[in-house]
Amino acid sequence: SPPNFNAAARVGARVIERIYYKAQSTFDAQWTEVRRKRALVEAELARGTAAEDEATAAAARASLSLLIDPELTDVGSRIGELAALVYAYADERSKTRALLCHTFHHARHERFHVARDMLLMSHLQDSIGFSDISTQILYNRALVRVGIAAFQHGHFAEAVAALGEMVGANRQRELLAQGLSSARFNERNPEQEKLERRRQVPFHMHISLELVEACFLVGTLLLELPLLCAQRADPKRRLNTMSKALRRLIDSYDRLVFAAPAEHLREHVMAAAHLLLDGESAAAAKTIVSLPVWDMSTDPKATRAMLQVRMQQEALRAYLISFAPAYKSVSLEQLSLRFELPVCKVHAAVSKMLANQELDAAWDGPSKALVFAHAAETSRLQTLCLQLSDRASNLVESNERLLDARTGGYGYKFDMKPPWGERGHGSGRGGGEGGYQGRGRGGGRGYQGNREDRGEGGGYQGNREGGGYRGGYQGNR
């Protein structure tokens, strides 16, 4: 009978979903253990045969028959073969899930560029909202794993973009199907809760939520450290491009009356941020690199080495932005010794800042020094003085407005002036005070008008006859 490729593709899709999350090191360890036990059994069989001990030899042969070579030695190549079969003969849903599993496997083994290209060329981000919930969960898992791989390669912008939706919404546990969210603000009936529990991922397939949050927070901090330095130099500057999650954490940390020693992950990141802003690069790098969460990454040693270098580079940028007004010039070798970086990397980092117009300075070739230009810059003390003068003027203006509202005029009581120039007293009969260039009979005031008879009336450039509050504007009444 002809081969049934459709059934084979369905079986291949099932196999992929059973092995895609496993690391190659797991299979290597299994194969190493099998070879070790096989060598021991073969030695025991040789001793039993030499001593003509049939019982020992038979037991050794039985154990040796069970220690066969593993069928799966290279999990990556096996997933690639099965995925090709699924792409050719399976339905659309199986193709999508196989692609996501394949992407997850590449990212799991730090092949970031391959995983990123597969995910982008599939255009799943445009149509994943129309898929079933289990496929959406698999997409979230693949996206988070790609973000972690990007962070481990030092691509912080890609890592923050991939992990931002998960960490920013604070629903990582629910979106990754690694637990149920609190039902306090999300009412669920028993049937919905039962369905959600069925979708939960087994514990051995979980992604460390602490590692996800650490990658996002550290990546965001290193990306937006120049913005933090700029805001510290000019507090009135509004930073609309800063991450909302990072801004909330910094604001809450700044409001603390007493900053206790850091205990949790977020506290360590905030403590490192303030150390970087204060120019203490070594202490900040030690705070981040020594976090135990990096032990959960694929290669902890390489991750810590990458973080050490990047923390030193970003500390160099923060130091130059924050303390540039205090220098006229600084030597390249001095910067290299201070931040424990090679001269070539310091020169490259500073040159990039000059190209991006982050520093108002220039290289001096003969002396190998960075010369700063302070023509249009103000010191920290001058900036604070300007802020104080602005706030004092705003306070005086608000007090004057309050006084005007209470007295009904503008200015202080003894500085009030007539609203139309100088006041004049007109002639009056029967008592009373005339108006401005006006004549009055009876009582009252008028402005350039004739007032006849009696009453409290008045007119503006017109004649008024009679009494009462009747008047006209440029007319006779």
Image (spheres, rainbow, N blue to C red):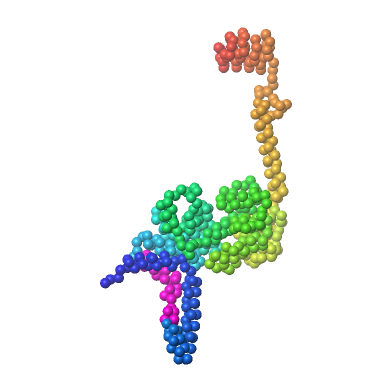
User: Is 196 displayed left or right of 352 in the figure?
Assistant: left
Which is nearer the eye, 119 or 148?
148
Specify start and end residues of the magenta stretch as a single range: 63-88
Who's the residue at 70% across and 46% down the image? 384
Query: Magenta stretch containing residue 81, yes or no?
Result: yes
Q: Is residue 387 above or below residue 360?
A: above
Q: To which quarter of the image does residue 71 belong?
A: bottom left
Where does the N terminus fall, quadrant-wise? bottom left
The dominant secondary structure in magenta is helix
Q: To which quarter of the image does residue 80 belong?
A: bottom left
Which is nearer the eye, 182 or 253?
182
User: Is 347 displayed left or right of 146 in the figure?
Assistant: right
On the image, the x and y values in percent for residue 362 come to: 66, 58
Q: Is residue 337 above or below residue 63?
A: above
On the image, the x and y values in percent for residue 417 come to: 69, 25
Can see residue 139? no
Who's the residue at 70% across and 26% down the image? 416
Where does the C terminus fall, quadrant-wise? top right
Can see residue 420? yes
Which is nearer the eye, 81 or 213?
213
